[in-house]
Image: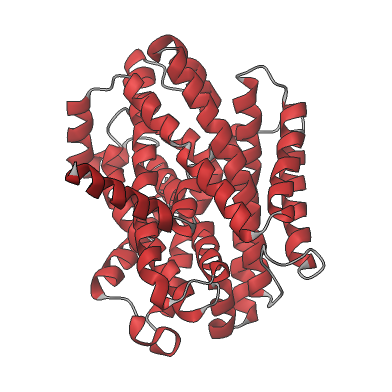
């Protein structure tokens, strides 16, 4: 009874501190991410599961860096870049991020459309309705209300873990593939380096660093409160890759095993699961896709609005009224409206947008990491809270790997 009470106390403590870190890590398992993980499992089986462990470590380190910078400085990442490197550098970074984020926003509304089409709801109804819902949640809600909505959405990712179990994967093969490092010859397999880049880009996206730091600042977290935020980041950074692993597992155990190696989107993966893993796996996969898409369609435009307004020194924040932060809210409105409108165009290449949005994330990520590393190691910015050697090793290694993969993609 004492042990049960002890664990109950621990669980309640974790639930009490989860917030920006948990939300940010989980929202990146969005429509593009779910498609990427599904395609990885369908095309390569269990062989890409090795990415999960190093990716989890990198995610923990990178997210912790952003949260710590927000807690110490009380400023967002683009705000710090502007102060330290000038408006021109910030503007170039912002434009690259806005372009990449917009492809991701379009991918989220594609996820909304395809997930509800599984339940026979037309995209001409689902997409406009979803756009109105996410606009109302963010524009009319306070920070605390929006955070509660996002946290609720985060816990629905458990649907993918259940779907993975229902798919009856080969657990021994999965465990071996997770622990076995890849051989050099694996990267010569057509599409392998591309998919590794997409998986990492889907899990550690550039926009996450801007959104997390802005959220920590808006929540009012300072360095005295950082212990709770560190737990929040840790829990989110472990939970999100576990969800990704179970999506790969589900598709490896069913689609890859049955020879169904090509899927058009994440909804196609759900359809293919029905005869192979049962209707419950199909339902959970489809419902999870809708939740993830709607969730990310709220946060990605929000992250972009934070980044641009901070970079230009303009007012931003969910606790401000529309009249107090006009550029922030109008930019959010424009991104939501344009992202939804694109999906309603006939013959739009949704598949290419889904994959390339994740690859663009992977290519842009090392540049964002380099800025973060330069800032977090400046004593004039961070005081005694600069990075440890371990954090620097992991973050620089992540940046170097992503640069190497990007170069491989160009030459291949």
Q: Position of residue 245 (x, y in %)?
A: 34, 37
Q: Residue furthest top?
A: 275
> Horizontally, is 153 left or right of 3 in the view?
right
Question: Picture quarter containing residue 345?
Answer: top right
Q: Residue furthest bottom?
A: 380
Q: How many numbered tags mark residues here? A: 0
> Horizontally, is 206 left or right of 92 in the view?
left
Picture layout, residue 169 above or below residue 50:
above
> Horizontally, is 206 left or right of 249 in the view?
right
- What colour-coding does the image apply? secondary structure
- Visible residue check, residue 175: yes
Q: What residue appears at the point 53 percent right and 84 percent down from the top-left corner?
A: 84
Q: What residue appears at the point 44 percent right and 72 percent down from the top-left corner?
A: 372
Question: Picture quarter containing residue 225?
Answer: bottom left
Q: Position of residue 195 (x, y in %)?
A: 40, 40
Question: Picture quarter containing residue 168?
Answer: top left
Q: Quadrant of the C terminus?
A: top left
Residue 86 versus residue 113: which sits nearer the camera?
113
- Visible residue check, residue 264: no
Q: What residue appears at the point 74 percent right and 48 percent down from the top-left corner?
A: 136
Picture layout, residue 153 above or below residue 164:
below
Q: Position of residue 181 (x, y in %)?
A: 20, 44
Q: Quadrant of the N terminus?
A: top left
Q: Residue furthest front?
A: 1
Q: Position of residue 87 (x, y in %)?
A: 64, 80
Q: What residue appears at the point 65 percent right and 53 percent down from the top-left corner?
A: 301
């Amino acid at each position: 009874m004492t042990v049960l009470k002890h664990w109950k106390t621990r669980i309640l403590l974790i639930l009490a501190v989860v917030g920006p870190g948990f939300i940010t890590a989980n929202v990146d398992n969005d429509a593009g991410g779910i498609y990427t993980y599904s395609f990885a499992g369908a095309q390569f089986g269990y062989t890409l599961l090795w990415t999960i462990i190093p990716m989890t470590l990198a995610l923990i380190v990178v997210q912790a860096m952003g949260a710590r910078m927000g807690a110490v400085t009380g400023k967002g990442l683009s705000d710090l870049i502007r102060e330290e490197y000038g408006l021109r550098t910030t503007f170039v970074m912002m434009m690259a991020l806005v372009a990449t984020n917009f492809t991701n926003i379009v991918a989220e509304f594609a996820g909304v459309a395809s997930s509800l089409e599984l339940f026979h709801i037309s995209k001409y109804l689902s997409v406009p309705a979803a756009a109105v819902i996410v606009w109302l949640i963010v524009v009319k809600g306070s920070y605390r209300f929006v955070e509660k909505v996002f946290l609720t959405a985060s816990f629905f990712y458990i649907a993918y873990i259940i779907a993975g179990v229902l798919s009856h994967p080969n657990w021994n093969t999965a465990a071996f593939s997770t622990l076995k490092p890849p051989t050099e010859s694996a990267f010569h397999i057509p599409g392998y380096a591309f998919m590794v880049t997409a998986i990492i880009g889907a899990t550690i996206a550039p926009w996450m660093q801007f959104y997390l730091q802005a959220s920590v600042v808006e929540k009012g977290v300072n360095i005295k409160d950082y212990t709770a935020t560190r737990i929040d980041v840790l829990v989110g950074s472990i939970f999100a890759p576990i969800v990704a692993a179970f999506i790969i597992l589900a598709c490896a155990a069913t689609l890859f095993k049955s020879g169904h190696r090509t899927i058009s989107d994440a909804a196609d993966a759900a359809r293919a699961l029905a005869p192979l893993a049962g209707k419950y796996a199909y339902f959970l996969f489809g419902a999870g896709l809708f939740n993830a898409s709607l969730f990310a369609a709220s946060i990605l435009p929000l992250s972009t609005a934070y980044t641009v307004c901070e970079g230009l020194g303009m007012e931003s924040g969910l606790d401000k009224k529309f009249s107090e932060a006009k550029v922030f809210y109008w930019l959010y409105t424009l991104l939501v409206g344009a992202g939804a409108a694109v999906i309603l165009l006939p013959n739009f290449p949704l598949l290419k947008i889904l994959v390339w949005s994740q690859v663009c994330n992977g290519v842009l990520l090392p540049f964002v990491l380099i800025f973060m590393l330069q800032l977090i190691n400046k004593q004039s910015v961070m005081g005694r809270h600069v990075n440890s050697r371990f954090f620097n090793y992991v973050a620089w290694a992540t940046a170097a790997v992503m640069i190497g993969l990007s170069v491989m993609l160009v030459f291949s």
